[in-house]
Image: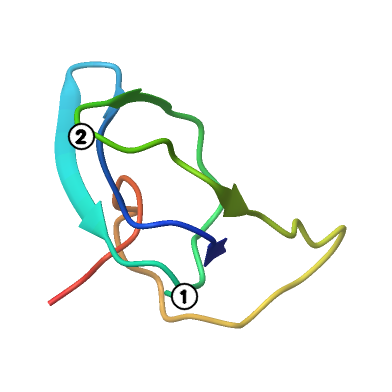
Amino acid sequence: MYTLSSFRRRLASGEEHRDVQIDAGTVGWLPAQQHYGENIGDTPTHVIFVELKDGGPQRSPVAATLGPQHA
């Protein structure tokens, strides 16, 4: 994922939801997931996602989290 603009969104999947604020130029890896988002900020959301056909970074088995993770 590469963000072209700074934005705030509410991401949801089933009963779980999470609010995120991401700055323009942020690059991140997301595990495969299905979710929907709602713009909760004052700016449009512009992001480029690249989906790999097979594989991807190998991770230790941990519970999938909704959306990008930021400290």
Quick one: label 1, few (<14), some, or many (20+) residues within 10 Å? few
Q: Is residue 32 above or below residue 71?
A: above
Q: Residue furthest right?
A: 53
Amino acid type, callout 2: Gly
What is the quadrant of residue 69 in the picture? bottom left
| Three-letter residue code for mark 1 | Gly
Q: Are marks 2 and 1 in contact (CB under 8 Å)?
A: no
- Tag on residue 47? none
* Frontmost residue, 69 versus 48: 48
Residue in the picture at 75% in, 56% down: 51
Q: Which residue is mark 1?
A: 25
Q: Is residue 7 left or right of residue 31?
A: left
For label 2, the crowd category at 10 Å Cα-Cα, with few meaning under 14, some 14 to 19 and many 20 or more, is: few
Query: Considering the numbered disc 1 on the image, is that residue within a helix, a strand or a loop?
Result: loop
Instruction: Reply above or below: 59 against 24.
Output: below
Residue depicted at x 32% and y 38%: 43
**Residue 61 vs residue 46, the one in the foreground:** 46
**SS state under label 2:** loop
Residue at image x 20%, y 49%? 20
For marks 2 and 1, give the CA distance: 17 Å
Q: Position of residue 4 (x, y in %)?
A: 53, 61
- Of all residues, the one furthest to the top in this rendering is 14
* Circle 2 residue: 41
